[in-house]
Amino acid sequence: MPVSSEPRVDDRAPANEVDGPALPINELFESLQGEGVLAGVPSVFIRTSGCNLRCWFCDSYHTSWEPTHAWMGLDEIIAAVDEFDADHVVLTGGEPLIHDASMSLINRLVDRGYHITVETNGTIAPPPETRIDLASISPKLASSTPTPERPPAGSDTAETDDVAVDDWQQRHEANRIDYDALTALVERFGFQLKFVLTGRDDLPEIEELIADLRAEAEPKIADTDVLLMPEGQTREQLAETRREVAEVAVESGYRYTPRLHVDLWNDAPET
Ligand code: SF4
């Protein structure tokens, strides 16, 4: 099957001196998985920098287009993961699959017995030999697209003036859904399809996407493989959206997922 993918960024030279394969790491910490079918499971989170999209509500914008990171070699990352007790690892971002070194890291961690979840926007299909246990796929809906009226988080920087937002609006719209990549992810790995909802109006687009994906992909996609998650980066914001999203879940048969880390720790970093 032809699978399109964004160019990966393995050609960037590490900013600091690292021998061998390396990744730009924004955070590496242990917490509870906050979302999805593994919510509540103690996990080590590896957050890479860099993303090929630019959602206006991105809660990781500091990793996506304002990278504040150091490069870490894969040996160093694995040693840091081994320091914790959790046997679940979540590779997240940004979009971790833009980095070729992510594939090596995933397979090396699987060899050490870790369960690997990859949080991805679903626009990049990793090679079939990548051994992901759970592809947590979060396709980005039209409501994610930044506009001059709805500029992305972090828009107080000079980079995100109207011209830049217009440019990102077009790039984001062109790239946010890739059915070949979505199909490959669903066919190759255990998966969940996780959608951030800003409200009831997002449901028709989700239903259309799921119908199209069911027509393309081999494995059965059950309604309970489709997770609805309220938009909100703070308890206050979640309080405004979660009731409506829960009602949409009941009506649609899709599954509601909480954001435990926001409930427990609000918007604190490393949670
Ligand atoms: S795809 Fe994810 S990391 Fe990338 S901009 Fe959107 S929310 Fe942020």
Image (cartoon, helix red, strand yellow):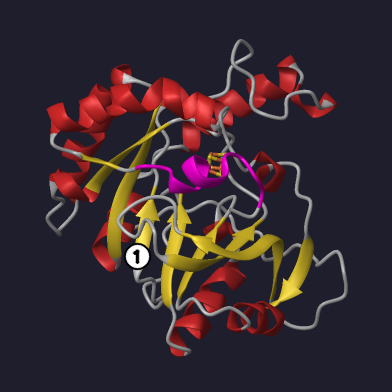
Residue 126 in sight here? no
Disc 1 residue type (three-letter): Leu
Residue 267 painted magenta: yes
User: In the rendered view, does 191 fall on the left or right side of 28?
Assistant: left
Picture coordinates of residue 71, whole percent (x, y): 77, 67
Q: Nearer the viewer, residue 86 or 193?
A: 86
Q: Quadrant of residue 99?
A: bottom right
Residue drawn at x 67%, y 22% as measured from the top left:
165
Picture coordinates of residue 108, whole percent (x, y): 52, 84
Q: Label 1: which residue?
A: 134
Label 1: state its secondary structure: strand
Picture coordinates of residue 42, whole percent (x, y): 46, 67
Q: In this view, does 264 lie above or below 172?
A: below
User: In the rendered view, does 8 fall on the left or right side of 66?
Assistant: left
User: In the rendered view, does 58 fall on the left or right side of 20?
Assistant: left
User: In the rendered view, does 84 fall on the left or right side of 86?
Assistant: right
Residue with the most extreme bottom position:
112
Some atom of ligand 1 lies within 8 Å of the CB belonging to the residue at label 1: no
Residue drawn at x 58%, y 53% as measured from the top left:
271
Residue 35 in sight here? yes
Magenta part of the protein: which range? 258-269
Q: In which quarter of the image is residue 234?
A: top right
Classify the position of ligand 1 by quadrant: top left, top right, bottom left or bottom right.
Answer: top right
Picture coordinates of residue 250, whole percent (x, y): 16, 31
